[in-house]
Image (cartoon, helix red, strand yellow):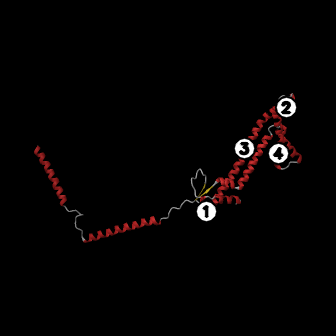
Amino acid sequence: MGLVSVSSRLLDRSALILASEKKVAEPTLASAPLSKEGKAMARQWRLVVGFTAFVLAVAAWRAMTFAPAPQPVTLGLVDMQKLLEGYKALQEDDARFRQTAQRRQQMLEARELLEPKEWEELDALERKEMDGKLTDAERKRLEELRKLTDERRAEIDRLRLKGQLSDEERKRLEYLQNLQRTNQAKLKELFEKFRTELDEINQRITQMHRQRIRDAAKQVAQQLNLKLVLVGDEDAVLYAEPTLDITEQVLAILNSGK
């Protein structure tokens, strides 16, 4: 049993060796000599491969050399602080807005110590004043009503500082103080009305001039072939060439009224 087993293994090993030797001895396609036609075909293939590699190399070189370079992004900067200070129409509208706000404040202060009938009379005269229809007598009365609160406020201060008040003076002081407290609710309501009006005016002016600034900046950008216009905020822009500043060009358009 053991001999058979060993013999079988030896036979198997001999078969493997013979098979290996046989494979080495057999000629392969690569080792076979080429005919004349085969040699000619091989030369042709080498020429084709070499020419193809040359063409690809030239194409790659041309692509790197003659490909259009990406166009730089041209931009302009606007100094908004300088723009707002030099924008004449905006400055004029801002001055008118401030005058309107100041006028509303004066209207509130003038009513602080007015009696109900005086308040109504002042309202009517101010409406006529806005329409430009005041007579000389009405204009005089209007000025008197506007001064009443200041006069009564001074009267309150004088009575408070006085040491001994007569009964009449005490009643007068109490009356004025009660009138002042009573008017607080009406003054608060009027204040809210004025604030709403001023907010609407401010919003309308701001939107109008913001659009005008945008239009002017767009016009300059088209003239200079700019792709982008930014606000040159010093907190946002770390560095910029002075030549990028187009504030003066934008201002020129805004102030020309075009």
Give the x, y percent position of residue 28: 22, 62
Query: Nearer the observer, disc 1 or disc 4?
Result: 1
Q: Disc 1 to disc 4, how far (Cα)?
A: 52 Å
Above or below residue 136? Residue 24 is below
* Left or right: 167 in relation to 17: right
Name the residue that disc number 4 marks.
126
Q: Amino acid at mark 1?
A: Leu
- Residue 173 position within the rendered picture, expressed as x and y whole percent measured from the top left: 83, 31
Q: Residue 163: which quarter of the image? A: top right
Residue depicted at x 36% and y 69%: 51
* Cα–Cα gap, marks 1 and 2: 74 Å
Which structural element holds mark 3? Answer: helix
Q: Which residue is mark 3?
A: 196
Q: Label 1, label 3: how many angstroms apart (C-alpha)?
A: 42 Å
The image shows residue 224 at horizontal and vertical percentages of: 61, 62
Sequence-wise first label, 4 or 3: 4
Residue carrying label 1:
224
Using residue 248 as the reference point, say whether residue 114 is left or right of it: right
* Quarter placement of the C terminus: bottom right
Tag 2: residue type? Arg
Query: Of circles 1 and 2, which is in front?
Result: 2
Mark seen at residue 55: none
Crowd class of label 3 (few under 14; some 14 to 19; many from 20; radius 10 Å): few
Residue 196 location, quadrant: top right
* Numbered circle sitting on residue 172: 2
Q: Which of the two labelled residues, at mark 1 and mark 4, occupies the earlier sequence position?
A: 4
Tell which circle, 2 or 3, labels the residue nearer the N-terminal end: 2
Q: CA distance from mark 4 to mark 2?
A: 28 Å
Kindly check if marks 1 and 2 are in contact, taking CB atoms under 8 A apart as contact: no
- Residue 44 vertical position relative to residue 90 in the rendered view, above or below: below
**In the shown orientation, is residue 36 left or right of residue 97?**
left
